[in-house]
Amino acid sequence: MIELAITLGLVLSLLSYEVFGLAAGGIVVPGYIALHLAHPDRMLGMLAVSLVTYLIVKIAGSYTFLYGRRQMVVCLLLGALLANLSRHLFTINLSAATIELTAVGWVIPGLIAHWFGKQGIFKTICVLIVTSVMVRLLVIAVFNGEMLPA
C-alpha cells in the first residue's frame, strides 16, 4: 500500500508539473502526505515547519548568496533539523489523546519550503492538497476501501 501511494504520488506530481507547470512540493511529497492525511495535527506541523524553513532561508538569502542548488541543500538541511526538533518539542500528551504537531518525514518540509520559494506558498499548497487527495482516493479505490496505515 505504501509503495503504491509513493508511486502514484510520483506519477501525479510529474503530471501536475508537466500539465500545469506547478510542482506539488517535490516529486515524492504527495505520496507521503497522502499516507498522513488522516492526521490533521501532523499536517499542521508539517506546514508550520515548512513555513518556518522557508522564512529562515528567505531571510538568510538576503544576507548571503543562496540560489539554486545551494538554496535547495540549505532548505533540506534546515527542514530536517526543524522536523526533528518538532518531534521532540511539539508532541502534546492530553489525558484523552496525543496531539502531534510534528512534521511528516525528514526531507518533506525542506522540499516544500524550497518550492514555496520557487512558485509561491499558495500555489504549492493548492497543488499539494489536490495531488495528495487524489493519491489517497486512488489508493483507497485500489484496495477496496481498506484502511491506510496510521
Image (spheres, rainbow, N blue to C red):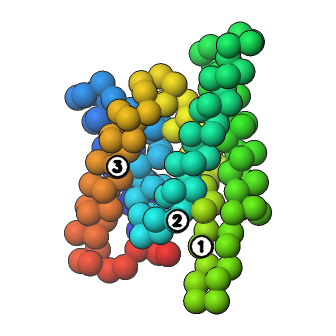
The kind of residue on which mark 3 rests is: Ile
> Residue 41: which disc?
2
Residue 21 % position (x, y): 30, 24
Looking at the image, is 89 positioned above or below residue 76?
below
Nearer the observer, 97 or 140: 97
Mark 1, Cα crowd under 10 Å, few <14 / some 14-19 / many 20+, is some
Give the structural element (helix, strand or loop) at label 1: strand
Quadrant housing residue 105: bottom right
Q: Which residue is mark 1?
A: 99
Quadrant housing residue 38: bottom left
The kind of residue on which mark 2 rests is: Asp
> Residue 129: which disc?
3
Nearer the observer, 107 or 93: 93
Give me the residue at 26% from left, 61% from top.
Answer: 138
The answer to whether marks 3 and 1 mark residues whose Cβ atoms lie closer than 8 Å is no
Residue 9 appears in view: no
Task: State which tag comes first along the sequence, 2 or 3.
Answer: 2
Mark 3 or 1: in front is 1
Quadrant housing residue 125: top left
Count of residue discs: 3
Distance of label 2 from label 1 (alpha carbons): 6 Å
Give me the residue at 55% from left, 30% from top.
Answer: 114
Give me the residue at 57% from left, 56% from top.
Answer: 45
Looking at the image, is 82 positioned above or below residue 98?
above
Residue 17 % position (x, y): 32, 30
The kind of residue on which mark 1 rests is: Ile
Q: Looking at the figure, which quarter contains the N terminus?
A: bottom left
